[in-house]
Amino acid sequence: MGGGADGASAVIGGNGVVGSYIVGHLARQGKLVFALSRSKRERSEGEWIRADLLEPNTLILPTFSTLYCTANAVLLADALPYLLNPSVKRVVAFSSTSVFTKQDTEVAAEKELIRQLLAAEQKIVAACQQRSIEWTILRPTLIYDEGRDSNITPLSQLIRRFRFMPLVGGAPGLRQPVHAEDLAVGAIAAAASHAAANKFYSLGGSETLSYREMIGRIFDALHLQRRLIPLPSWLWRAGFGLAQPLFPGSNVAMGIRMMRDMTFDCTPAARDFGWSPRAFHPIFDQSSVRLLSRES
């Protein structure tokens, strides 16, 4: 394992959708970066360190000044005291705008997850404050990275398989999908910004569009004709039990939320660290299509 250095960074979730972009951008800037994850991945960027937040007492890390965490904030909250060595100056952790959008969910598991996430945010803040370490917590909206994410990619798989998409209530609810790479760039900028210290930020994409239009653009990216089937909410509720096997990982509340706006003011992020994400125009290139084909 290489030695630490002032200005070095550690990225928890370094193999993940957002974390891998953080590692890549820092490495290309000539920065020393340690990619922490539970499983090793062959990479030419950064130095990999096996780390499991469920076993924080086993962590043996070099010194670093900035800690990024794109992994589950609930796990980070418990492990953070083991990670904050005297050289750490800033912690940038990812949470989710779900702490707002799912507070009134009818699904008990979602309600419990939001309770845990809110508690984790406060625990992270308290751990940093106790050690006089600056912190920034980023709450993204709907994250995508073609072929890799758990939001747009599963929807694209369903569309490729069935060639249509049911939309509860016509899906007028507004969304701000945000690309994983933009979040990585934003996290690095936030870490370098004094104005972003000790603050929470909601981060959405540059474009606000209806859920219906968002789905339509996935059809466009797959070069398929848009086939959007509106369903009344009562029919979605009544038929969900039969349809659930076709939509793995979904629940009734997910469909109902298609009708609700889930947008946030990103002006503070633009002001404090130059947040400037791309518009939502997904591109499923050959590598993305191969991933989708294997997972469909």
Image (cartoon, helix red, strand yellow):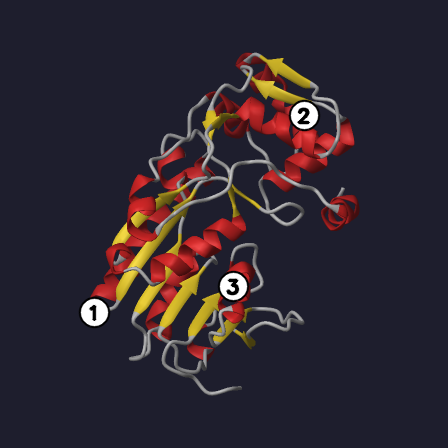
Mark 1 or mark 2, earlier in chain: 1
Q: Mark 3 points at which residue?
A: 25
User: Residue 167 at x, y = what percent?
Assistant: 60, 20
- Is 288 left, or right, of 173 in this rendering? right
Q: How far apart are marks 1 and 2 (CA)?
A: 51 Å
User: Residue 168 at x, y = what percent?
Assistant: 56, 18
Look at label 1 and name its amino acid. Answer: Ser
Q: Nearer the viewer, mark 2 or mark 3?
A: 3
Look at label 3 and name its amino acid. Answer: His
- Quarter where residue 74 is shown: bottom left
Numbered mark located on residue 243 in the image: 2
- Quarter where residue 264 is shown: top left
Question: Who is closer to the viewer here, 194 or 152?
Answer: 194
User: Residue 51 at x, y = what percent?
Assistant: 51, 72
Q: Residue at x 63, y 73 (%)?
A: 44
- Is 236 left, or right, of 275 in this rendering? right
Q: Distance between the residues labelled 2 and 3?
A: 41 Å
- Bin the neighbour count of mark 3 within 10 Å (Cα to Cα): few under 14, some 14-19, many 20 and up: some
Mark 2 or mark 3, earlier in chain: 3
Confirm whether residue 245 shows in the render. no
Q: Residue at x 69, y 29 (%)?
A: 219
Numbered mark located on residue 132 in the image: 1
Look at label 2 and name its amino acid. Answer: Ala
- Bin the neighbour count of mark 1 within 10 Å (Cα to Cα): few under 14, some 14-19, many 20 and up: few
User: Residue 15 at x, y = what percent?
Assistant: 58, 63
Question: Who is closer to the viewer here, 64 or 28?
Answer: 28
Q: Residue at x 56, y 61 (%)?
A: 20
Say which quadrant the C terminus sits in: top right
Residue 161's place in the image compared with 256, above or below, is below
- Mark 1 and mark 2 in contact? Answer it, CB < 8 Å: no
Q: What element carries label 1?
A: loop
Q: What element carries label 2?
A: helix
